[in-house]
Image (cartoon, grey):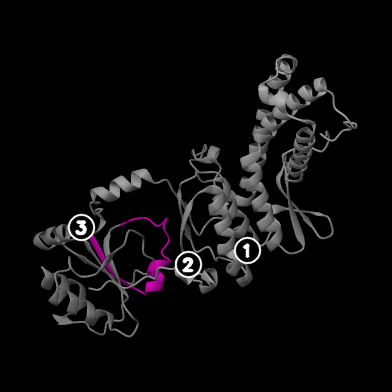
Amino acid sequence: MILKLLDALFSRNGQPALAMPFDEFRVDFDDSTSFWITKESQEEIESAAMEDLLVSQGVRFCMTDQEPFIATLMFLLHNHNPIDVELIYSFRRTAKLIKTLTFPRYESFSEDLRRLLQESIQKRSAPEEEPDWLVETRKMISIHFIETQRLLNVRKDSQNPGKDGEQQPLVPAVRMYSEELAAMIRSKLAEYASLSQSLDGTFPERVFNPTLMQLQMDEKELRRQLALLEEKRLRLISTGLLDHGGTTTFELGDHVDESKKIMLSVYIEDTQKKLSIFDNLFEKIHLLTEIVNKRFLYKNIAINKERGFVFTTSKNTILPLENLSSGEQHELVLFYELLFKVAPGSLILIDEPELSLHIVWQKQFLQDVQKVTQLSDIDILMATHSPDIIHNRWDLVVGLKEPEN
């Protein structure tokens, strides 16, 4: 069968066509069987368009430009079983069809060729059976992948095809995440309002029936707790979680009588419960804005319950999110995902975190990531080509090595 394949594809008058200047050959049989072989560079293989369609069974393999295409292919076919040769099977339409040969149906050749290709493709495409320990481990770990293409996204409501069977266009991830964060804040505010209404409705009853702890709170502790509440309220306002207005600072006078102590102690306990609703969200927003404002030059980020991310320039003008540089968008999107899109205890896989980042940002990247891992209780595994991302933490690096065999 191999000799027939060679004769069909590479011979002129029975002689091997070693000098034929073709990068691709295709055989079309009368029974609609098609077979093609293509020479491509490694770069062409890696950049192959994923949306291309399979139009026929074919074999594609990578060679250096210095190696004669025909001679090397003939050597492989003469001396190896093609199933064992390191050929890369392609499932895409080729745009390099140069030489097409048409033959009448050749029964044994056609059947052998189809069987060979089918067996080879099945062998290479069939997933290897995973060991039991790996299957069980994967079930126990929540994994979140942050890919290199992270600046565009599809809205959840656009996953279903429209009237024409086409999805809606991709939208900038910064825009989508800005809207998500605004929705999160509004959800917490609704939870805050609901709890406030519930506690306010039972406030008089609890004042007349104080707990032992409320009865034992002295005046000094009352003043300290009120000051802490005011500090917390101001922090929540600064991150956009609460509106300006309202204060816990008021004149208590030189002395607070027992009836006021009980009322204040109940008020303090209620306010602590209300504000605690924002604790987790506040920590994440605070860290995100800290990282961004430390990195971005001549602009400042603030968080708004209606708009999410709000950037203002040094001239105090609003900057549209899409006007951020690609590096700024990568930084914002990546840290937003780490802080808001993953569950505690997850394993996060990041591909090429250095994309579009200034070298100074790359050197500071791991420091910021460690702050996130401490806050969110996650583990991160990243693949990078940049020694600047690693910076001075080579103790964390595991290098890739070629297989021993």
- Residue 83, compared with residue 76, is above or below; it is above
Amino acid beneath label 2: Thr
Task: Give the image location of residue 262, x and y in percent.
Answer: 76, 22
Residue at mark 3 to residue at mark 1: CA–CA distance: 42 Å
Residue denoted by label 2: 384
Label 3 element class: helix
Residue at figure coordinates x 13%, y 76% from the top left: 78
Residue at figure coordinates x 55%, y 63% from the top left: 366
Task: Give the image location of residue 6, x and y in percent.
Answer: 16, 74
Amino acid beneath label 1: Gly
Quadrant the C terminus occupies: bottom left
First reached walking from the N terminus: tag 2 or tag 3? 3
Label 1 element class: helix
Residue neighbourhood size for the residue with mark 1, other residues' Cα within 10 Å, grouped as few (<14), some (14–19), many (≥20): some
Residue denoted by label 1: 327
Residue 320 is left or right of residue 254, and the answer is left
Do callouts 2 and 3 mark residues in contact (Cβ within 8 Å)?
no
First reached walking from the N terminus: tag 3 or tag 1? 3
Task: Give the image location of residue 91, x and y in percent.
Answer: 32, 58
Task: Place residue 99 in its image quadrant.
Answer: bottom left
Task: Give the image location of residue 333, x and y in percent.
Answer: 59, 54
- Residue 87, compared with residue 152, is above or below; it is below
Label 2 element class: loop
Amino acid beneath label 3: Lys
Task: Place residue 391 in its image quadrant.
Answer: bottom right
Is residue 48 inside the magenta stretch?
yes
Residue denoted by label 3: 123
Please state the extent of the stretch shown in magenta in the rendering: 34-55
Quadrant the N terminus occupies: bottom left
Residue at mark 2 to residue at mark 1: CA–CA distance: 16 Å
